[in-house]
Image (cartoon, rainbow, N blue to C red):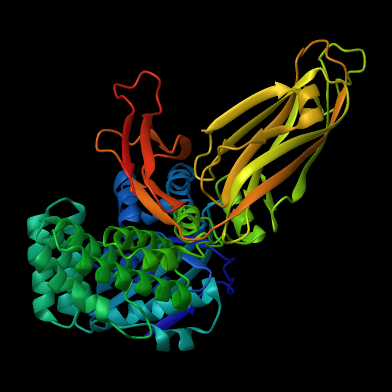
Amino acid sequence: MILAAACAPHVASAGMVVAAFNFQMTSKTPEWSWVGKFLADRIGSDLLGGRGLTVVARDRMQAVARELRWAPEMATTDAAMGKVHSRLKVARVITGVYSVGGGKVRVVAQIVDVPSRTEVARMEVAGPVGDVLKLQKALSADLLAWLAGGTPKRILQRLPVWTQSVPATKALYEGLDLYDQGRYAEAWLKFRLSAANDPQYTEARYWVGRMHYFLGQYAHARIELAPLLRLTSDAPHPRIVDALREYCHSFEAGGVDLAEQHSVYDMARRRYEQLHKREGWREAREAAERFRLKTVTLLDLLGRHKEAAVLAGPAVFGARIRSGASALNMLAHNAMTGETLTVQQIAKQSQYLNYGGQTLKFRRDGEQITSPSGDRILGTRHKDIDPKAALCGPRAGKTVFLVAPSGSVFKSLRIDPVTVGSTDAVLNVALGRLDCRRAYFDQRTIPLASARREGMTLVKLPRTGILKVKWDVCITDEVNSPPLVVEGVGITVRLEKLAAHGSVAVSCRDTSNFIAEVDGVPQRYWPGVIGLLTPGEHTLTLRPIEKDAPYSPWTTRFR
């Protein structure tokens, strides 16, 4: 065996995205053509063990490779790598060539820096063709050492070996080549042949299960996928994220009872959390959050509301989650329990949702907190206008998040503008929820002179401890209004202590675009839970959001 590395190691920056593309055979040995995809797939899987690396999924890479008719010489060309970068957002591409002859195999791999289109490292392995599986692992160790740090010898010792059977590996990757061409029946036969050659080859069992899954044969799919989920080795199988998703969906699509579905969700959530904590896999982190939300919803359907509330919060996840599950859980947790989160946690969520607002945490009834501004507004042609000033516009205001202490809901709000100068303006206030970015329940406008004297009071508030308020002061004449300095608004709250409380889930089979009111007060947009309601009888009304909707308001009473 010969190992060689042409460049000094370079440790990857956190979150570096890497893709392993198909290798190209340069010898006329068609019986070894499967090695090209085998090398790309196994190297990509092994790179998942490198801290700081994010590896592009095989299916995404193959789709781009098929579109480009990939060849390794494309790795340093502008045309091909421009498409690779735009589609996959990668920093490094690994590819290469191999040849078989005289009972030997030789593999040359290159690491290409995608932005600069330059080769930054080259590795080579060679040896008896019967050792191709061992040679691939040695190559992965060299690549990982260069990309993520460490010594190849130590890395090689911890790389997982899923099979030592060359015939099983050959059948699997011949099947994957057929799968990529859409020849699924032929691919399935190859996957089954691979599993027959090595019954312990988890990868082959996964692909047999996946074909059952695609055909809707969910019971058979679960039999094949389950062994992969039970693996307890130090190195998790690279297909486990996909296998978990397909395994869980087989229960959703297969019509099992809710209690069994809950146990599957709970298993998936815990396994994904484990994968994130132990391996740092970003995809597993996001999947764990999605399954937490699925489990909360399912517990609600089962009537296990207390468990749902506990699992829903504290529901802040520090990084940006595409699903938005954290923000929804945060509100659901408050609706079910009356508990609110800290200013710092709420602030993280507001940044994720791109509101950019201030967060004000109130601690007692009657407390006033100022939402500061400091902007100067006036008409565009007033003599005091400064055309170069950034703060000389027609309006000034902010979006503010109000957080009540745990165990309380907002009973009323009073908004008092703090301004200096002209009263030739109005105060606008809109009331909404954190999970509804543009829509507001209550929008009011009063003259600034009146607002200065007596403030603006809002009394019909949703039953919640987390509110969104958008306020602004706007001049009445955008051309001639005199200068006005808006220092901010004072927000005074009246709080109601929670005693016994309940909740109601609302939905509509005809449309999801509705506003839900309880006792004439808007509570939420769209389907979901309305919580923190007092005991007794209430009136629920669903109203369509669109003015010209073909639906009429619907009302019922509940206890």
Going 42% across and 62% down the picture, which residue do you hit? Answer: 289
Q: On the image, which quarter does residue 416 sit in?
A: top right
Residue 219 lies left or right of residue 18; in this view the side is left
The outermost residue toward the front is 536
Q: Is residue 424 above or below residue 495?
A: above
Residue 51 lies left or right of residue 389; in this view the side is left
Q: Report the number of numbered marks.
A: 0
Going 60% across and 46% down the picture, which residue do you hit? Answer: 411
Residue 207 lies left or right of residue 542; in this view the side is left
Going 52% across and 43% down the picture, which residue do you hit? Answer: 462
Residue in front for this viewpoint, 205 or 439: 439
Residue 158 position in % (x across, y down): 41, 86
Going 78% across and 20% down the picture, which residue do you hit? Answer: 425
Residue 63 position in % (x across, y down): 31, 49
Image quarter of the N terminus: bottom left
The outermost residue toward the right is 384
Q: Is residue 380 above or below residue 330?
A: above
Residue in front for this viewpoint, 359 or 496: 496
Q: Is residue 414 above or below residue 327?
A: above
Q: On the image, which quarter does residue 41 sit in?
A: bottom left
Q: On the image, which quarter does residue 236 sit in?
A: bottom left
Q: Is residue 227 visible?
A: yes
Residue in front for this viewpoint, 174 or 127: 174
Q: Is residue 126 visible?
A: no
Residue 311 position in % (x across, y down): 42, 67
Residue 117 lies left or right of residue 479; in this view the side is left
